[in-house]
Image (cartoon, coloured by chain):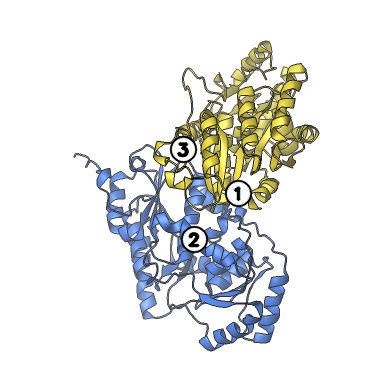
Chain colours: A blue, B yellow
């Protein structure tokens, strides 16, 4: 048998955008991140950014290599050629493990099945399979794929997900916060003006437009009121490749830092508010992603509050309270220890 | 007046080795690190490595640009052309502010005088001027240079230095641990064997060779006994440029991780032992650098102990005790807050 030489000068785009070609062939132990997002969800971009910081700051002796989502198939074939026994395969974190985002779930199945003999991890996720026939079918496909891999660890980012993972999979399970909460980011000091709504326009949306209109009306008392999403409009920004990730993420943090109040049903708009010390009122999505992250990890943050209330008068009082709080800190560093232990051993 | 165009394709070596040329001309706020070491003291290399991590992880919106020590003069001229009003000038940390390492002290004087109108900082240092005529003369020259700069902050890394800085300079003073203690580094798990002595061969050395020989003799009971220094032999490694910094630093950490016990009079051999959870017996240098860092910040670490004892029997008992301790942690993150506040504002 002859070993196929690797033509590192003729690589598919999206394989190792964060490294120089010698990274593929040096003798360092390697960590491969699959599913690195090219789509415009800044929450998912921030997760990939945070995973990179987490690994490179704590484990500088590993070679950390990303494979972009659009290069998953070619990436699997390429990594098969260069992977060594003690290397690690990761799939990125987020809120897409389950039956709602099948393009991503299919890639995750492929990766864990393809590298079934290697230490593998699904980085912190929220898990949700719909409670219907479609959901059950997809759950079965996911189980069949993941269970081929006896070396798989699944990280759950809320208690609710931890229960689901334990009930659904035979894999090892660990429990940590969302990766973005592991950043050391120090917010820029900005003049704050007005209110920004970050609201879903996707299948997880549960907030009614009449209610949103009512909220937008009374928040005018704080200044300008604008509406956006942490998923950028693909007509304006079609994709975000590795090279532009930091820029878009930091622009989003600056935007949030410039507001007096954030109103959102997005988990990461809440987390970005915490990073930037911006008062934030949080509502739910279809299956409790923001709610449970808040309750499990973040409820000691006094300038952010989760609520299911529809009582506008009560919400006004709550918003006033949040804006009067002196921003406090929550230290979750120790809560990432299970992840540190995973990569250490 | 015409503005001189900057020929970024024809830069002196050592200016911005950590960035691509567009970094000099983009519109980000900039932090310049002067004095980035090219010499083979791995302690000083580790400090520069840690400063880079500290800034880039907490303040990713700044452009962080290093100027190597050998390019100080050309670097000053270059930075004068591109610096903006709210940029920050740093000089690296270490144990060389004073009259013992005049080549570095002269560079530091030049930098703080040249950028007297810009926010400037001497990163965490130990300060020592000899108590003689030479020391007094050099102190005067340092005062004259630093005092031109009304925007200068000096960071002291021990209480002893804090006192000296307050008595000697009109500048702002802040107090933080050595920068290397700010790393998130997670040690590799290695087989441990034998004992390594890291001992000075410089003007700060106070340990007598007879005593060292006696120590090396009884430590043989733990296995092999070797002797080295955290300053690499320049006949083997003449210089360490930015590109090779991480490699040499990680090699040193691996070496220390592979030992059962470290015996040293080097501050950074002690700090590397803490990072790698390696039992370590620490002796003094001429002016208390390791001693005071230990007493001020690190005395809760149970597997490391500072001692001035010459009683070999007592030292044996102490070494045995250190090796039996379960490695504990010290969390100094909050102690860097004055530095975070400096860069934030």
Q: Is the residue at mark 1 from the same chain as the one at mark 3?
A: yes
Chain where mark 1 sits: B
Q: Quadrant of residue B307?
A: top right
Asked which secondary structure carries label 3, the reply is loop
Say if A276 sits above or below A101 in the image. Answer: above
Chain where mark 2 sits: A
Q: Nearer the viewer, mark 3 or mark 2?
A: 3
Mark 3, Cα crowd under 10 Å, few <14 / some 14-19 / many 20+, is: some
Instruction: Choose between A103 and A263: the one closer to the eye.
Output: A263
Q: Quadrant of residue B332?
A: top right
Chain where mark 3 sits: B
Q: Is residue A303 left or right of residue B25?
A: right
Q: Position of residue A41 (x, y in %)?
A: 44, 67
What residue is shown with label 3?
B17
N-term-proximal mark, 1 vs 3: 3
Mark 2, Cα crowd under 10 Å, few <14 / some 14-19 / many 20+, is: many
Q: Position of residue B300 (x, y in %)?
A: 72, 39
Q: Residue furthest bottom?
A: A210
Q: CA distance from mark 2 to mark 1?
A: 26 Å
Q: CA distance from mark 3 to mark 2?
A: 25 Å
Q: Is residue A307 left or right of residue A235?
A: right
What residue is shown with label 2?
A249
Residue drawn at point x = 50 percent, y = 74 percent = A228
Q: Which numbered marker is on residue B85?
A: 1
Q: Is the residue at mark 2 from the same chain as the one at mark 1?
A: no
Q: Is residue B339 left or right of residue B24?
A: right
């Amino acid at each position: 048998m002859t070993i196929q030489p690797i033509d590192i000068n003729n690589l598919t785009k999206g394989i190792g955008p964060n490294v120089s070609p010698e990274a593929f062939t040096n003798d360092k132990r390697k960590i491969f991140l699959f599913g690195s997002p090219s789509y415009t969800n800044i929450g998912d971009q921030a997760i990939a950014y945070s995973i990179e910081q987490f690994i490179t700051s704590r484990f500088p002796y590993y070679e950390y290599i990303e494979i972009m989502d659009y290069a998953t198939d070619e990436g699997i074939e390429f990594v098969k050629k260069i992977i060594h026994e003690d290397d690690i395969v990761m799939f990125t974190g987020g809120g897409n493990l389950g039956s709602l985002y099948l393009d991503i779930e299919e890639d995750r199945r492929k990766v864990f099945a393809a590298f079934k003999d290697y230490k593998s991890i699904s980085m912190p996720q929220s898990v949700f399979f719909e409670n219907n026939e479609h959901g059950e079918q997809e759950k079965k496909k996911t189980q069949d794929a993941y269970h081929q891999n006896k070396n798989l660890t699944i990280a759950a980012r809320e208690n609710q997900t931890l229960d689901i993972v334990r009930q659904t999979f035979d894999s090892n399970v660990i429990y940590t916060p969302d990766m973005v909460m592991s950043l050391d980011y120090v917010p820029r000091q900005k003049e704050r003006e007005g209110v920004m709504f970050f609201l879903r326009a996707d299948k997880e949306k549960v907030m009614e437009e009449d209610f949103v209109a009512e909220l937008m009306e009374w928040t005018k008392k704080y200044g300008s009121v604008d509406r956006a999403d942490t998923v950028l409009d693909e007509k304006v920004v079609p994709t975000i490749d590795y090279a532009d990730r930091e820029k878009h993420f930091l622009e989003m943090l600056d935007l949030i830092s410039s507001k007096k109040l954030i109103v959102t049903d997005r988990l990461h708009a809440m987390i970005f508010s915490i990073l930037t010390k911006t008062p934030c009122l949080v509502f739910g999505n279809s299956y409790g992603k923001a709610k449970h992250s808040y309750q499990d990890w973040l409820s000691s943050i006094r300038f952010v509050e989760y609520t299911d209330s529809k009582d506008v008068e009560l919400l006004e009082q709550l918003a006033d309270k949040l804006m009067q709080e002196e921003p406090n800190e929550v230290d979750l560093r120790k809560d990432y220890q299970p992840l540190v232990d995973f990569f250490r051993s």
